[in-house]
Amino acid sequence: MVAGVVWSATFHLEFLKGATMRFDKILLGIVLVILLGSAWYLHPLFVKPPYLQFIAKDAHYHSQFAHACDEILAGHPVGTNKSISIPVTDVSLPEAIQKLHPDAVEVRSNSVWIRITTNTAMRFGIKWEPYDHTQPHLWVLRAIGESGPQQLYSETR
């Protein structure tokens, strides 16, 4: 009888030990799923959206970007058309513009418009054009996005 009680107690302890180990593994799995899900959900809070990354670049970068837009103007004359659309896969697009993976590039006689869709809900555009009709020799690079138009660079021509 004592042997049966000892065997029964040993069996229950082993069973409970195994159940506890399974519970620990399940609990660990649940915690990992919660942590990974939270990281996936919250990662946009720690990564700047492309629009903010673009406007945060320095003046030298924006100057190079404006000159890339000048290359587009020089390489794609509009002629008698009001505007032309350049395929975003066109190899003649300068590297600075290709790196942004634009959706559309539109050229007019005196401006370049670049539209960019990002993996966020926001799209943004970049425009290189004369400041206005009263100052046609002052050209400006503007980003148009979630915070409205932002002038990033200008130069007199």
Image: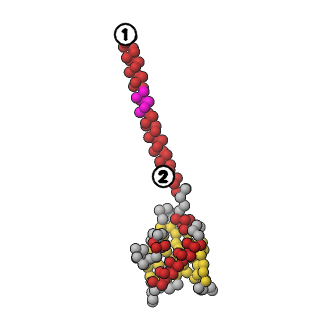
Label whose residue precedes the other's in the sequence (1 or 2): 1
Mark 2 lies on a secondary structure that is helix
Mark 1 lies on a secondary structure that is loop
CB under 8 Å between discs 1 and 2: no
Residue 109 shows in the view: yes
Quarter of the image that includes the N terminus: top left
Q: Which mark is residue 40?
A: 2
Amino acid type at circle 1 is Met
Mark 2: give few (<14), some (14-19) or many (20+) Cα within 10 Å: few
Asked whether 43 falls inside the magenta stretch, the response is no
Mark 1: give few (<14), some (14-19) or many (20+) Cα within 10 Å: few
Q: Residue at x 45, y 89 (%)?
A: 80
Choose between 71 and 140: the one closer to the eye: 71
Residue indicated by mark 1 = 1
Extreme bottom residue here?
A: 80
Mark 1 and mark 2: Cα distance apart in space: 58 Å
Point out residue 59 in the picture as x, y percentages from the top left corner.
59, 72
What span is colored magenta in the figure? 17-22
How many marks the image carries: the answer is 2
- Position of 84 with respect to 65 (left or right) is left
Quarter of the image that includes the C terminus: bottom right
Asked whether 19 falls inside the magenta stretch, the response is yes
Magenta stretch: dominant secondary structure: helix
Q: Residue at x 54, y 75 (%)?
A: 64
Q: Residue at x 57, y 73 (%)?
A: 60
Which of the 4 image quadrants contains residue 11? top left
